Amino acid sequence: MRAILQRVTEASCRVDGDITGEIKTGFLVLLGIEDADTKEDAQWLAQKITGMRIFGDDNGLMNKALADVDGRILLISQFTLFAQTKKGNRPSFIRAARPDKAIPLYKHMIELLDGLTGQKTQTGIFGADMKISLINDGPVTIIMDTKDRDNF
């Protein structure tokens, strides 16, 4: 699994003009799932996301986690995070999991995040053409990959 974590002051997702998910302070998480991913990968990533201390404290240092600022999560599925761009100019998405594998893991991630935060995770709609709006705070953007755990 690969996640792009963005600290935001607000973020929302629209599908066909309707808001499907919306938050104020918190994380916009773009989540890519590949065929090799497991529930264990989701567990590790959910714990990393919810424990990430990237909100400012009284001294302006990144010491506070999501729970410390009463933050929320907007989770968006994004298969393009596994784009391969080595050949030509048209990306290949062969590493991205097909919906029959990705949807259950995406739903599992939502359940994990709900449980870890005690809040309802806001979402987009899997596979839909989504319009994402955000105000990136900082900007602070963190990239995480469950296949590269030693670097996190």
Image (cartoon, helix red, strand yellow):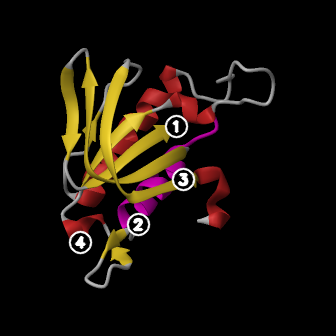
Closer to the camera in the image, 143 or 141 = 141
Secondary element at image label 2: loop
Residue 128 picture location, percent across and down: 37, 18
Above or below residue 48? Residue 111 is: above
Residue beneath the point at 79% across and 30% down: 86
Q: Amino acid at mark 2?
A: Met
Residue 95 picture location, percent across and down: 66, 30
Name the residue beneath numbered marker 2.
52
Secondary element at image label 4: helix
Q: CA distance from mark 1 to mark 3?
A: 11 Å
Which quadrant of the structure image shows residue 108? top left
Contact, mark 1 vs mark 3 (Cβ under 8 Å): no
Q: The magenta stretch spans which residues?
A: 35-52
Q: CA distance from mark 4 to mark 3?
A: 21 Å
Closer to the camera in the image, 113 or 53 = 53
Name the residue beneath numbered marker 1.
32
Q: Is residue 45 magenta?
A: yes
Contact, mark 3 vs mark 2 (Cβ under 8 Å): no
Name the residue beneath numbered marker 4.
68
Residue beneath the point at 43% across and 28% down: 103
Q: CA distance from mark 2 to mark 1?
A: 19 Å
Residue positioned most to the top:
16
Q: CA distance from mark 3 to mark 2?
A: 12 Å
Q: On the rendered structure, is 36 left or right of 137?
A: right
Contact, mark 2 vs mark 1 (Cβ under 8 Å): no
Name the residue beneath numbered marker 3.
143
Q: Dot 4: few (<14), some (14–19), or many (≥20) neighbours within 10 Å?
A: few
Secondary element at image label 1: strand
